[in-house]
Amino acid sequence: MSARAAIIVTGTEVLTGRVADANGPWVAQRLFALGVDLAHIDVVGDRPEDIEAALAFLAGGGMDLVITTGGLGPTADDLTAEVVGRFQGREPVLDTALEARIAEILRGIADRWPGLDRAALDAGTRKQAVVPRGAEVLEPVGTAPGLVVAPAAGAGPTVVVLPGPPRELRGMWPAAEASAGFRAAVAGATTYREAELRMFGIPESEIAETLRRAEGAGVDLGALEVTTCLRRGEVEVVTRYEPAAQAAYDAFAGVVRERHAGTLFSEDGSSVEQVVARRLTERGWTIATAESCTAGLLAARLTELPGSSAYVAGGVVVYSDAAKTALAGVDPELIAAHGAVSPEVALALAEGALARLGADVGVGITGIAGPGGGTPDKPVGLVCFCVAARDGRRLALREQIPGGRADVRDRSTTVALHLVRRLLAGAGDRAPA
Amino acid sequence: MSARAAIIVTGTEVLTGRVADANGPWVAQRLFALGVDLAHIDVVGDRPEDIEAALAFLAGGGMDLVITTGGLGPTADDLTAEVVGRFQGREPVLDTALEARIAEILRGIADRWPGLDRAALDAGTRKQAVVPRGAEVLEPVGTAPGLVVAPAAGAGPTVVVLPGPPRELRGMWPAAEASAGFRAAVAGATTYREAELRMFGIPESEIAETLRRAEGAGVDLGALEVTTCLRRGEVEVVTRYEPAAQAAYDAFAGVVRERHAGTLFSEDGSSVEQVVARRLTERGWTIATAESCTAGLLAARLTELPGSSAYVAGGVVVYSDAAKTALAGVDPELIAAHGAVSPEVALALAEGALARLGADVGVGITGIAGPGGGTPDKPVGLVCFCVAARDGRRLALREQIPGGRADVRDRSTTVALHLVRRLLAGAGDRAPA
């Protein structure tokens, strides 16, 4: 049997949606790597009764380990340590050695604010040094210590109490993982493998049929936990399995490979940006962009990866017709004849990017992101793409992209990256001489 | 007594930290605006027993309303509707009229994939049209319908079942909120007002001192729920209060206005993009960008707002030194003398954007986003900014921005937008003739 775990994220600012939670997903990935079976991430506000209710729910659900984040500060609304101690049946005690260590950390900080209230500072330090009797203390990375609190009597989960600031939590994690209480709680963890297949250009429903065919072909799907999701227009199939099920996974991947040969583009977790980056680097090629409706989003996405300066030459954001002419050399008569959103202008943009930036691949994107600007002929969401290679190959696409303004813009960068990927894989027609 | 609510976010991809949850925080803010008291956001994987356990926990905790997100797709691992129906004591029935409507939506999509497996598509459609008997159906925004499912017998929360893709969820929200089941569940909600003040250029800790001064000045802070957070480098102070506390809020806002006159830039929830857009529009001015380390992110952010084509001329992404010269006319000797990341090159970029795009305001950004490329003199995170107006005014800044590559790039767009805002408000020195 595997070890089961849950995470309680505390903080009214997270619960109300003001601040995005960076800790839950991060801890989830650490637990996953340890083979721990994570069942819940529960976000609660700074109310003791809600934190207590979450602890009781998770203990009742048979968790072996509960990780809490947040609520360890020096002020009165930071009450996680107190609530967890009570829940685990351990009375609060002042750890005077810990109090001295926190005071030492604060000495340097306090000197920077001359007008500071010393008595308030000392009270905060003492509060942070009050810990449940018998808990393991994790040394502060900021000023707050973490705690590993096993139940005082009987069964129940061990609770690991970590600070809310992501930098402090991440810094403290190795010590938490190495603590005796943590190791005992996850002793039963299974080792899992995870594999990811990514496809572009099919609807998610196709995967259901692929699963049925795999089953028909005798693949042991019961040994695989297959999850499908649609992200930024791509279908991701993630499979988690125990090492003994490797043969079942290989058989499943074989069925996917055969059925989706034309759309499967990644088998090792690589994103399309990474695939494009690798192929550009292999050839020693550079890429340049000319973007209208996406207005820099494609260039920004291409440069998300460190080291992208090796293959990204640059780009132009040609939101206005005048800019299309000034920066990408698009003939104003071409725009007048076909409209700014047209395959002809997309081609001219791709060729303009290629020429102006002396690149090996040029990308042109022009479309109607909305909400205004649509016509019956050219509705909102219509986007024309063209990718041009220095060797003369051209690859073009005219797509109707669903969704609102942000969706159309974001999805367009995915479509464009897949066009580039296909061109780099050898697709595309030579332009007539 | 107020209405209590909880959110269950389903999806193994969210639980395992592979996909960030965009729905929990968004729904939280909608509930908050309705005066509903949100107690938990629980993230679970695609396992029926874990979803059931979460429903039982929340029902036991006295929730009036539970919102679920995700698990409404056409594949077998999409099981939220089935689990919720069972939990609420309602048997699954095929809604044939709904099946026909989903099939109609899919007709247009299916035509784009000629090799599609029709039987698989039909099976998926039928699955999505199976709903708990007596549930209110919310019309699909994508292909999946939402559901409002009251308990068949006795007390318990009404469960509103919404799709996972953020665009579909957001599109369906108005119908969910207007449904009879939703309105009955939140009938006890208190009415709150919410006001937002945004500042740029102060540390968050300053707000604690402002609160103390407000208290000293006799402001009734007990009637106000003040939350402070730091987002994209800006300090946001959000205050929630009942209508009777309007005078207390006005007094508090007065203290903030006086103490933070130099940094308060928004009192009506406007973002800095919106403030800049308004000021450009008022003057009939256009803006152009020349971006190195942000590589299009500023142009993309400026064009997030519909109608931005009225004031965004365009921009250049000058990731390489050659592109800085080719697209923004930066003298190669200037780069050789001062380095690509220097106030001199930032100025040349701003002036180049201004000239090449015939704009009224030009923005230049050049910096070291990292993780590589830093030196002792010019460490990772150093970014030089310049904003130039056609009337000759210049405003420059050299900033050391903390965080990783994505943080440095994102924060740089915020710093640049605030420089533009200040220039448009009249700041800046004339360049020597």
Image (spheres, coloured by chain):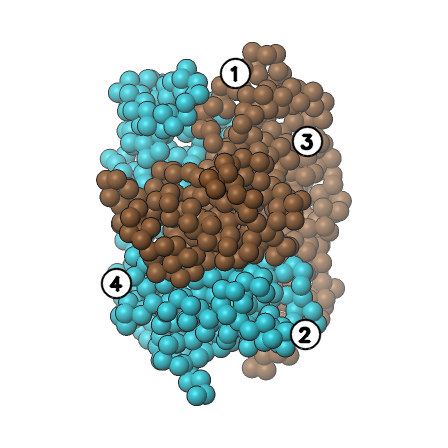
Chain colours: A brown, B cyan
Please give the label number shown on residue A192. Answer: 3
Q: Position of residue B157 (x, y in %)?
A: 36, 34
Whole-number angstrom distance, CA of label 3 to CA of label 4: 56 Å
Specify the quadrant of the image occupied by residue B390: bottom left
The answer to whether residue A77 shows anywhere in this view is no
Q: Residues within 10 Å of mark 1 (few under 14, many from 20)?
A: some
Q: Secondary structure at mark 1?
A: helix
Q: What residue is drawn where x is 72% and y is 46%?
A: A177
Distance from disc 1 to disc 2, alpha carbons, whole Å, reads 61 Å
Question: Tag 2, which secondary structure?
Answer: loop
Quadrant in which the N terminus of chain A is drawn: top right
Name which residue type carries label 2. Asp
Between tags 1 and 4, which lies in front?
1
Q: Position of residue B179 (x, y in %)?
A: 25, 36
Q: Amino acid at mark 3?
A: Tyr
Distance from Cα at disc 3 to Cα at disc 2: 46 Å
Is there a contact, CB below 8 Å, between mark 1 and mark 3? no
Quadrant for residue A254, please give it.
Answer: top right
Q: Which residue is mark 1?
A: A212
What's the amino acid at mark 4?
A: Ala
